[in-house]
Image: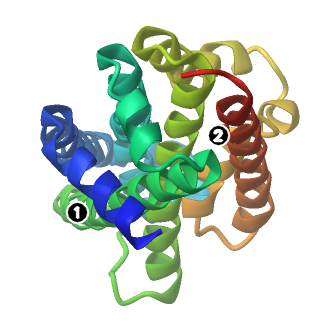
Amino acid sequence: MKAALRGEWRKLRTLRSTSYCLIALAILSIGFGALFSGGASEIYQERPADFDPTALSLQGGMMFGQLVVGLLGVLSITSEYATGTIRASLTTVPRRGRLFAAKAVVVGLVAAVAGLTAALGSFLIGQGALAASGVPHASIGDPEAVRAVLGGGLYLALIGQLGLALGFLTRSTAAGVTLLTSMTVLVLAVLQLLPPEVAGLWPTVAGAQVVTTLPHSSPWPGFLLYTGFVAVLTGAALLTFRRKDA
């Protein structure tokens, strides 16, 4: 397993797309976190009771940052199918379950570190923008703020696993990215037509509630639903990988 982990880390580290994805994640998370927070004064004036400065700064970065982290997960496996190197990987690590686990661990750890870093940067930049706007803002020393930042990082880490699962299931970068975009961003247009209590049951929407800090909010049930959804897709991906030829 140690050799498999080293091999997967070497492959992910040397992929050119990995560096591009991490740079794009930093730019999108911090940029959109600041952008969403910059227009907070109008939101606060309209609905002061529902104003959540922590969630506002984090959700802006997560909305588009999740696409980059998910893309990293998709490319980590579809690049091997595209080039045919998956056969060499299976020759080196013939046990498919071990190879799958090693790739999932490496992608998960990279996505977790990148996600936590992006969430922290989005929070700090966003709260600075809120303070400049003269509206209530949070401090990283607040217990709920720490929980929300950690939750945002975990959300992005699981998006990396979701992308990996879609990559294994489709074996195609185009198909994997299309499904990922549909599940995370495009579906929001459809959910707006549904009652809030129904729309909130979609796994990625439910999972994103982990960054809310309002007193009446319940962030963890939705996150558990989201985690279960990713786990089911990961199980289906493992089953597909074991049964289909490379």
Callout 2 secondary element: helix
Residue type for callout 2: Thr
State left or right for residue 140 relative to residue 156: left
Q: Quadrant of residue 211?
A: bottom right
Query: Which structural element holds mark 1?
Result: helix
Q: Residue at x 45, y 19 (%)?
A: 177
Position of 165 relative to 193 (above/below): below
User: Which label number is shown at residue 204?
Assistant: 2
Q: Amino acid at mark 1?
A: Gly
Q: Nearer the viewer, residue 107 or 66?
A: 107
Q: Could you tell me which residue is drawn at 20 percent across and 56 percent down?
A: 129
N-term-proximal mark, 1 vs 2 = 1
Residue 217 is at least partly visible in this image: no
Residue named by callout 1: 121
Answer whether labels 1 and 2 touch (C-beta < 8 Å): no
In the drawing, does residue 41 fall left or right of residue 191? left
Number of disc labels: 2
Mark 1 to mark 2 CA distance (whole Å): 22 Å
Looking at the figure, which quarter contains the C terminus? top right
Q: Is residue 77 above or below residue 134?
A: above
Crowd class of label 2 (few under 14; some 14 to 19; many from 20; radius 10 Å): many
| Image side of residue 190 versus residue 126, left or right | right
